[in-house]
Amino acid sequence: MAKPAALREVSRYRPTAWAETVLLPLLGLALAMILDRQAPFTASSFPWLWLIPFLLGLRYGLGAATIGSFVLTGAGFAAHWFAAIGQPPPLIQIVGGMFAALIAGQFSSNWRDRVQANALRTAYAEERLEALTRAYFINRISHDRLEEALITQPVTLRGALEQSRTLRKDKDEVINQANATDLLQLLAQYCRFETAALHVMVRGRLREDPLAVLGPSAPLSVTDPLLVQAREHAQAAYYSIDQLHELDTAGGYRAVFPLRNAGDEELGMLVVRDMPLLALTEENLTTATAIVQYFADESWAIAQSADLRRLFPGCPPRFAHELVKLQHLHAVSSVRSMLVTVRIPEPTREQPLDAQAIHQGIRRSLDVYWLDPFSQPASGLLVLLPLAGPASARGYLDRLDAWLREHGIDKGLAAPGFRSGQIPVDRRTPDVLLDAAGIDGIADEAQS
């Protein structure tokens, strides 16, 4: 059961407040008895004794006004009972004095509650302002870091894979010091690696001395938990931000990426010792995984693309090579790519455009084209869009449609003889994907 407001106030009184509440009415009555022992309560036309509980109410609230009034009244009746004064306190004065004191006490209590509520609101507002100021400061630092990152580094995986095509490669050596150094420089640029090393496999053993390093060099820590996990599960291993406190006791690596091609051949390990805290994001580490896998699949893709070209003799070497790598990249990292088929009618006076003209008109740097892949009399092109989904394929077709309209084909892709389609690069093998695109291989030619 909740206590009345007056009792709650009394329970919070300090000893000095208790002393004032009890002793001041008694001292006032004693002074009045000295001035007029016969009738101290009515010695003056003004009931000044009741100013004491009135002032106590203003100072301490309703509880003090109530206690002070009862102490003054009780002391007056007790003094009359023991014949210390001649007349008892008059009833009408007691009622009026108590009402005045209680009104003052109620006013003081309400005012005190309002002041306390305002103080609580002010303290909460100051706390919230401090939290918002701290959050704003952190957000500003983060914004400055992101702005610096956007200015100093590219941000798209498409750009990273496009640049990875320029890495120096040796036909006799899968990984050498030159292309390993280029790979680390690429990861430093796109994924903000600061200290990293690439260790290769030599006769079935992981070499402790790095083939290429980024930042200070250090021997391989074969007992590091991330390295052990990456080798056991054949996939990238790294700490999340909330696990960084474990680095002091667990090991010195922040991320480990295995170099394992699609033929399940372990080529080496890429270990990262240091990178910015803001770079420890799933998106950034997924990008790094895709770049490393794309690099590791190079020699395997050369052999597989040769087999694919034997099935489809007209397939350009670069197209076959990229299709094999992107198909395996999707299988490992779920990175999407698309195949777009465009069939066009034979050039005429009304429609003078051919596949070569279309290719030159809308080509992009990362896209790979196969001109005239379909059997005659059909003409057209097959476009491989790396790191693209259905929306990107639709955007490519929209650009092609706009380009055709600009070059005299009024209906664009809806004109007679034009046909287009989209095929996702998924877990199906490259030869199955080309069959789905309508490309005839040597098996079909043999049957015909």
Image (cartoon, helix red, strand yellow):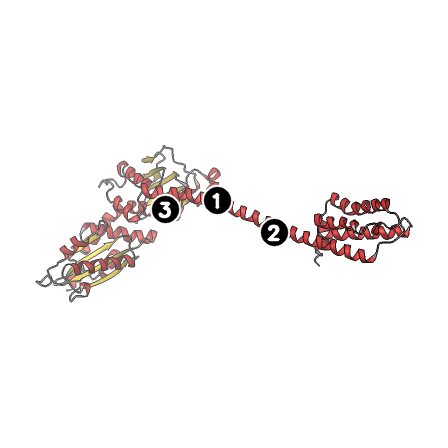
Tell me which label, 2 or 3, sits earlier in the chain.
2
Instruction: Tell me the mark number nearer the camera, choosing from 2 and 1.
Output: 2
Q: Is residue 411 left or right of residue 223?
A: left
Identity, as a three-letter code, of the amino acid under mark 2: Ala
SS at mark 1 in the image: helix
Q: Is residue 332 left or right of residue 312?
A: right
Identity, as a three-letter code, of the amino acid under mark 1: Thr
Identity, as a three-letter code, of the amino acid under mark 3: Asn
In this rendering, the answer to whether 50 lies above or below 256 is below
Q: CA distance from mark 1 to mark 3?
A: 29 Å
Q: Is residue 70 left or right of residue 226?
A: right
In this rendering, the answer to whether 1 lies above or below 199 is below
Residue placed most toward the observer, 348 or 165: 348
Q: CA distance from mark 2 to mark 3?
A: 49 Å
Instruction: Tell me the mark number nearer the camera, choosing from 1 and 3.
Output: 1
Q: Which residue is mark 3?
A: 284
Q: Which residue is mark 1?
A: 133
Tell me which label, 2 or 1, sits earlier in the chain.
2
| Residue 276, quarter of picture | top left
SS at mark 3 in the image: helix
Q: Residues within 10 Å of mark 1 (few under 14, many from 20)?
A: few
Q: Position of residue 411 (x, y in %)?
A: 17, 65
Q: Which residue is mark 2?
A: 117
Instruction: Tell me the mark number nearer the camera, choosing from 2 and 3.
Output: 2
Q: Position of residue 128 (x, y in %)?
A: 52, 48
